[in-house]
Amino acid sequence: MRASAMEGGVVLMVMAVLPMLLLLPFTSGTSQPPNVIIMLMDDMGWGDLGTNGEPSRETPNVDKMARDGLTVTSMYTAAPLCSPSRAALLTGRLPIRNGFYTNNTHGRNAYTPQEIVGGISQSEVLLPELLKSRGYTSGLIGKWHLGHRSPYLPLERGFDYWFGSPNCHLGPYDDVTTPNIPVFRNASMIGRYFEDFAIDESEAVSNMTRLFTEEAVSFIDRQADEGPFFLLWAADATHEPVYASSLYHATSRRGRYGDAVRELDAGVGAILDAVRDAGVDNNTLVVFTSDNGAALVSKQHGGSNGPFLCGKQTTFEGGMRAPGIFWWPGVLSPGSISHQVWTQMDLFSTVLQLAGVTPPEDRELDGLALANSLFHPDQQVLRPVFYYRGDRLMAVRQGSYKMHLWTFSTPPAELEVGINFCPGVDVENVTTPTPTDHSDRPILFNILVDPAERYPIAFNASEYNIQVPVLQQVVSDHRAHLEPGEPQLNWCDPAVMHWAPPGCEELGKCLKIPPSNPTLCVWPH
Amino acid sequence: MRASAMEGGVVLMVMAVLPMLLLLPFTSGTSQPPNVIIMLMDDMGWGDLGTNGEPSRETPNVDKMARDGLTVTSMYTAAPLCSPSRAALLTGRLPIRNGFYTNNTHGRNAYTPQEIVGGISQSEVLLPELLKSRGYTSGLIGKWHLGHRSPYLPLERGFDYWFGSPNCHLGPYDDVTTPNIPVFRNASMIGRYFEDFAIDESEAVSNMTRLFTEEAVSFIDRQADEGPFFLLWAADATHEPVYASSLYHATSRRGRYGDAVRELDAGVGAILDAVRDAGVDNNTLVVFTSDNGAALVSKQHGGSNGPFLCGKQTTFEGGMRAPGIFWWPGVLSPGSISHQVWTQMDLFSTVLQLAGVTPPEDRELDGLALANSLFHPDQQVLRPVFYYRGDRLMAVRQGSYKMHLWTFSTPPAELEVGINFCPGVDVENVTTPTPTDHSDRPILFNILVDPAERYPIAFNASEYNIQVPVLQQVVSDHRAHLEPGEPQLNWCDPAVMHWAPPGCEELGKCLKIPPSNPTLCVWPH
């Protein structure tokens, strides 16, 4: 896509692309590339932030981060759920390329539950691996979700430090039919959720956000004087089961989900304070975003996507539009707004650009190096956004327009058991309960005038007949350069579950591994 | 209601209500009560402001006003459409009391089209009339909408200056079957829309926002040294047909509605500048709000209610939750947030409080004097909000809970002709297309956890069984103190249209008045 973006790329405001180094303000003052912290929330919605209008205004630290930094109004995840979204951020490539999808069923979302056999392919190159060439030390604090079998774990893939879990903190399990999820420090487990790291599901209480925050602050303290660092802060308190520590329990106006948000917001404040206290704030880029839209399936215990349509699991804006807040004191203009359209794969390319690392040239990348748009928020590059659900290209946005080739909200069988990814909305011919092919006559929205995707442009409108061919050409160009990766999320096996993670012997926490019984995973939506 | 609010009132944070004068910071420095400017937008939605999350962030002046001032997160209009909402703001009384409703049909919205016979009753006392006792000069710049026959006009009701129109700027009319709407300066018309004050509907261009802004700036310049002033800036560019001047035409990312918003936002900036330039900023309270939710019936040419349900005409949050931004440099804490629940009738009572005027004691008032909550944003008084559609109490909110006694979105006959007040949403048993009586088993929402009104609390939940009786008691108390006013919006007559407004003779713009033919007005929704 990088190649096709170059071919089809139209620079909206400025045609000349200056040599990269001229654009980087820090290069004049220091030879050290910047530290980078990506704060990647889990299932937190665009509308959960005060700065994005959440009525209870319970994110003063993130809001201040936005006031002191730059807000990107169109930040897209690469997928509407966790694993493929995170894999794309760290590889700079769409899941359809890096293999984080399934083709057991076409057009279905897949992720990495603990019975998944696959993980991020060895043939992929991850951001922390690339940053090593410039002397970066990389830390992951929080959820991984790129595969939990040994070759896939973070320390095998460029991270120098890890505290967190390989999978979602679901449970509690009985350790007989299903083992509880382990928590790792570096290459070894140090305990399990619900056993050694408590989560009180009924009260929504756990200390994990506090631990993730303390770990991040310690990492920054340790690394600030030791050359550049990259920190991925992947706290997960807003993923079900949501939680907060007793300090934040029942403090939110918004209920237990809000408690989780409040504690994460305090964590953001503590991390920014740590960066300042370490004296590296002028050389540290911090990005706040989320891995997908709020999980509306959680109903009143889930987050908010503000005005956007539907949520996690869908390719409507509510599924893939994420917060995008950049903070870099002394470098980014305080309170600035950028309408540059970003995907999180651009974080991969832009961090490499800022670090002065040449991106891999042996593969298609979907990320663009957009540092220039951070330093010059009024400048924009026209670029496409592709909305995939599994192996199916559902929609594309470029500029003001978004075109749906396929629509799919929640399958009827799921609706019957109370699962609903689009609760309370019903847009005719758009929030279709079954996968609906509109390829012959796509659904078109002006996503600036109608960000909530409520008013499809009439098929006979001249606007429709001008814009749809433009977007269809974008799709053709994309497909012409697309070589799907080997799907990694097809096979499941109870034997690969967390019976005996590395380090279990020392803890006396190894469980009996059942016989291998690989089956095709079932992905219903 | 004031009495019942006192009886049932629970002070959330602070029990003691200090004597009023002790709370007013300006009283120590000057004997002059503060100037007051209320910026009352027309059909602008809560979600149209950058500070409330509008993705295109096109309201830098209002956003800065919020950063420099105080944001009230729960500001309610008294009705989901213009005339009754405005009448309530200026009388401090619900439309059911001040007569701005119809009972031709029960539970239907009514307003003041130019065939309306009625207007604001002589027995009502308006805010500018009351402010005269403290030497205020009052100006209305923009739309009136409280009745256009001579006794009802602004200069008859306490305003000292008026530039604007008595009704919505609809048209163009042919001046034969229907006359174009006049524009007044003070007691006389000075021209008509589409004739002397151009509105290009097809291009959405008009200079009116520029004129309303210039008029407001002039008023401030004239009055700043002349004792206290009250200015109601009632610009109407976001009411259909939306418009902006050529300077703002096609400048918004959001289309023509956005052009209107951008020019209004610039007007806000110009007015605040004028206040500062006149040196009265430390003695001027400015409030930014809107008369009802965005008119979603206008589809992509209408505004946004952000995450809230439905829009104008409905008693869901999207119909009645308005922006609430207070600005008073040196007095209000910059960037502060207040979760005090306000209604716009509180503006009436609070302005009187600030001015040191005793409110009328011979009638029930629905407004509360809430100056204390401006100066101490963490302090809240528990109080009810009543959501009326015409003469029918549809819902009530108190604290965290909102209870719907009736629900009604858009009647089927209107849906068939493309009118939809709840486009794209469908909440079972809530967005009912016909008026639905839930009095026996009300619909209950936790409006803090679920501001979008998506997840009714289960009828068998203990929360339901605890909270519904509390709210039912609030309703009983309200009804016990309710003496409905004489309905003013029942009768229509072609003879009362703007054939020959005051001043038409001098302009040679008098039209022939047709025979009187009073009929009951038809209010379909």
Image (cartoon, coloured by chain):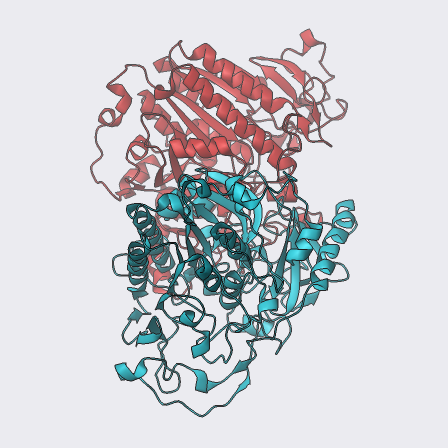
Chain colours: A red, B cyan
Can you give x and y, in whole percent of width and height, for residue A304 in the image? 56, 43
Residue occupying image coordinates x 46% and y 86%:
B494
Can you give x and y, in whole percent of width and height, for residue A175 in the image? 75, 22
**In this picture, is A119 found above or below B113?**
above
- Note whether residue A456 is visible: no
Q: Quadrant of the N terminus of chain A?
A: top left
- Could you tell whether A49 is left or right of A21 in the image? right
Q: Quadrant of the C terminus of chain A?
A: top right
- Note whether residue B28 is visible: yes
Can you give x and y, in whole percent of width and height, for residue A279 in the image? 38, 15
Quarter where residue A183 is shown: top right
Between B505 and A354, the residue placed more toward the observer is: B505
Residue occupying image coordinates x 62% and y 67%:
B433
Can you give x and y, in whole percent of width and height, for residue A362 in the image? 35, 26
Quarter where residue B211 is shown: bottom left
Between A380 and B298, the residue placed more toward the observer is: B298
**In this picture, is A333 found above or below B280?**
above
| Residue farthest along the bottom direction in this orientation | B515
Between A496 and A315, the residue placed more toward the observer is: A315
Figure label count: 0
